[in-house]
Structure formats: structure tokens, C-alpha cells
């Protein structure tokens, strides 16, 4: 039989809740005034179920393509990448 | 499929010629389409602007722009990501990674979207209680690639194998041997069936019908990881599929099937396209 010992961490004195909330509020307001919003890429742009915007863009051979023209039998895949140049 | 960036047609022409790319690379110079898709990379502007020394901006630059820092030529790029749309133009799935170095390969996205088939050489294993066919989403991978190992598993006639959540039994698991430079992501197991095992009067989660496991793997793309891979031609992953099978009368001993996958290692393109060629 294996006996498992649970380690007990030393208890730290808890700050009164009001002080904790006040500290959080001060940091938050200070942050909102100065920091830019953090990015969540999953929330950017067309979401599942929404229509993807139309476009007309030239490819590497100068041939124009629209969203409709790249469609295959099951739909299309659009891969956005940073650059081919660097 | 089409790939979109803010590069000029001239750059894309040289790039596709020099790299043998045949699918459309669309030129969105001016980033109008990128903006219309809502994915203009705003981190670039932050990193070039008043907040450039902010630690949060520096962290986001590492994640979404470049490991070697920002440059004004980067203004107008998209956040890297992929949309899969249906024939009506509606988005059916989207994949936007949290680190630009790590991108799911196109093939692995097709696997995740449920559109897959063994177009690469697959390994078939016939066991006492199940048959399995396994193949990687990509036969060749580059540093930073997020790809999949696909296992199509078919329990034998009258056989079921224990699924995750089956307490007291060896639930099916794919154990990939750890190695430096490889990150194994947790598997999202498909929905299981519930089996009523009469001899013990219990309900257990099992797989009876054929099912597929997708094991996602990231080949690390940091500069250190790339240095460690230099000179290597292949990456070999090994592991075991561990499971326990039963029929309607008895359970068999847990079994372990050794598996391995060897993928060709591609290096990242480090040179800019030569516009004169």
C-alpha cells in the first residue's frame, strides 16, 4: 500500500478583501489609461458561420481571382501569411 | 486554395518561380482585403509607435510579428491564419495560431476539418482485436510546422476497446516518446459509445465502431530548435497505441502496439526572392 502524504503549504495572512479589490482597481484604471488592448486572434475577423468578404486580387501571374473563382467542389481555403519577402 | 499577403505581384512572381509554387498567391498590396477580413496586424503599429517599450507589446511582437523585432516594411501585414469556407462563402472553420512561427500545415487543417484520407503512404497494422492504419498529415515537415499523425482504428468483429473515462480499465491512449524539439499536443478524443457490460452490470465508455485519432505535433521552430535540427534529413517519431479490448463475454489483457513515423525534414526558406531572376 502506498501512503500519500499531502504537503501543507504555510498559510499566508490574507489581506482584507477591500484592500485587495482597491489595489486591483487602481492597477486596472492605470493600465487602461496606458496599455493597448491585448490581442486575442481567435476573435479577430470573420467568425465561423459568417460570410467571408469578397475580393478581387491578382495572383503571381497577374491573373485576377475572386473568392468565388478559387472555390473547389468542397469550398475554399484562404491562407493569410505575413510575407513572401522576408 | 489561395494564399494572401500584402506582397506585390512582382515579389510573388519571383517567389513562386523560385520555389515552384503553383497555387495562387494573391497580392493584396495596400492591405484592403486584409483589412476587410478584419485581420490587419495591429501589433506592428503598436511596436513602431508610442508603446514600443511596453512589455505586453514586446511579447505580442514576438508572438505575432517577428522574433527579430519589428521593421516599418512590416506595416500592413495580416495576422497569420487560415479560413476554410464552404461553397456559399461562409466560414466553416478558422485557425489562427498564437505564435507566428508555429503554423498548422494545410494538410493537417484538412485533417482537423474532417476532410482527410491517406494520400501518403500509410502503415497498416493488424492486431488480434483491432486493425489500424496510420499516416502523417504531411510526409515532409519544416520547423514550426504543426501537423498530425492520423490513426484510423477499426475494432474487430464483436470487439470494443475502452475509451477515455473508462475507470478501472486501460483506456485507449497514444503515447508518443518525448524527444527534444517535438511538442506533443493533447489528443481530442472522438465521442465514444456506451457499452453495458452484463457480466459486471456496468456501463462503460467504449469504441466499437471505427474511429479516428488525430495526434497533433509541433516541430519546434525557435532558432535554437532549428540549430539542433541542422544536418538532419528526417525526423522519426515513435510511440505506442495502448488499449484494452473486450468482447461481450470477456476482457483481454491490455495490449500495446509499437508505432513509428518518419518524416522528411524541410528547412525554412531564409532568402528573399530574387526579383531579377
Image: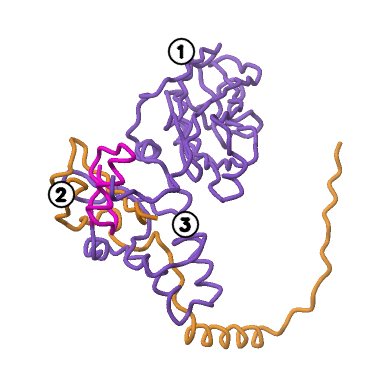
Neighbours of disc 2 within 10 Å: few (<14), some (14-19), many (20+)? some
Q: CA distance from mark 1 to mark 3?
A: 43 Å
Name the residue: 57% across, 28% down: B236
**Residue at mark 1: chain:** B
Name the residue: 42% across, 32% down: B138
Figure colour of chain B: purple
Q: Are marks 2 and 3 in contact (CB under 8 Å)?
A: no
Whether labels 1 and 2 belong to a single chain: the reply is: no
- Residue underneath mark 1: B157
Point out residue B256 in the picture as x, y percentages from the top left corner. 63, 21
Q: Which mark is residue B251?
A: none
Question: In the picture, which quadrant includes the N terminus of chain A?
Answer: top right
- Residue underneath mark 2: A62
Badge 3 element: loop
Point out residue B173 in the picture as x, y percentages from the top left corner. 58, 31
Q: Which mark is residue B98?
A: 3
Q: Is residue B28 visible?
A: yes
**Residue at mark 3: chain:** B
- Residue A43 falls in image quadrant: bottom left
Horizontal side, residue B48 vs residue A18: left or right: left
User: Which mark lies nearer to you, 2 or 3?
Assistant: 2
- Residue bounds of the magenta highlight: B1-27
Image colouring: by chain
Amino acid at each position: 500500500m502506498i501512503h500519500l502524504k499531502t504537503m501543507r503549504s504555510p498559510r499566508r495572512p490574507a489581506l482584507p478583501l477591500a484592500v485587495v479589490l482597491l489595489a486591483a482597481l487602481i492597477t486596472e484604471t492605470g493600465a487602461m489609461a496606458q496599455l493597448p488592448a491585448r490581442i486575442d486572434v481567435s476573435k479577430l475577423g470573420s467568425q465561423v458561420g459568417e460570410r467571408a468578404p469578397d475580393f478581387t486580387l491578382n495572383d503571381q501571374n497577374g491573373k485576377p481571382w475572386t473568392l468565388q473563382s478559387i472555390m473547389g467542389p468542397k469550398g475554399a481555403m484562404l491562407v493569410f501569411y505575413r510575407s513572401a519577402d522576408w | 486554395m489561395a494564399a494572401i499577403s500584402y506582397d506585390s505581384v512582382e515579389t510573388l512572381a519571383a517567389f513562386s518561380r523560385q520555389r515552384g509554387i503553383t497555387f495562387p498567391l494573391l497580392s493584396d498590396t495596400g492591405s484592403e482585403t486584409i483589412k476587410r477580413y478584419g485581420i490587419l496586424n495591429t501589433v506592428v503599429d503598436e511596436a513602431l509607435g508610442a508603446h514600443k517599450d511596453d512589455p505586453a507589446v514586446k511579447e505580442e511582437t514576438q508572438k505575432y510579428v517577428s522574433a527579430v523585432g519589428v521593421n516599418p516594411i512590416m506595416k500592413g501585414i495580416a495576422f497569420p491564419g487560415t479560413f476554410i469556407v464552404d461553397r456559399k462563402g461562409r466560414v466553416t472553420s478558422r485557425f489562427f495560431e498564437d505564435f507566428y512561427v508555429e503554423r498548422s500545415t494545410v494538410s493537417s487543417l484538412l485533417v482537423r476539418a474532417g476532410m482527410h484520407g491517406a494520400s501518403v503512404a500509410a502503415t497498416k497494422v493488424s492486431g488480434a482485436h483491432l486493425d489500424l492504419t496510420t499516416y502523417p498529415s504531411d510526409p515532409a515537415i519544416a520547423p514550426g510546422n504543426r501537423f498530425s499523425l492520423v490513426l484510423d482504428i477499426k475494432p474487430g468483429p464483436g470487439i470494443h476497446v475502452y475509451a477515455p473515462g473508462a475507470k478501472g480499465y486501460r483506456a485507449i491512449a497514444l503515447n508518443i516518446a518525448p524527444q527534444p524539439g517535438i511538442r506533443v499536443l493533447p489528443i481530442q478524443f472522438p465521442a465514444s459509445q456506451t457499452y453495458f457490460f452484463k457480466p459486471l452490470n456496468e456501463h462503460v465508455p467504449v469504441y466499437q465502431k471505427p474511429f479516428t485519432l488525430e495526434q497533433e505535433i509541433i516541430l519546434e521552430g525557435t532558432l535554437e530548435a532549428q540549430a539542433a535540427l541542422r544536418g538532419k534529413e528526417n525526423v522519426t517519431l515513435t510511440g505506442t497505441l495502448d488499449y484494452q479490448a473486450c468482447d461481450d463475454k470477456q476482457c483481454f489483457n491490455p495490449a500495446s502496439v509499437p508505432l513509428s513515423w518518419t518524416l522528411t525534414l524541410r528547412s525554412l526558406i531564409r532568402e528573399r526572392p530574387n526579383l531579377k531572376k
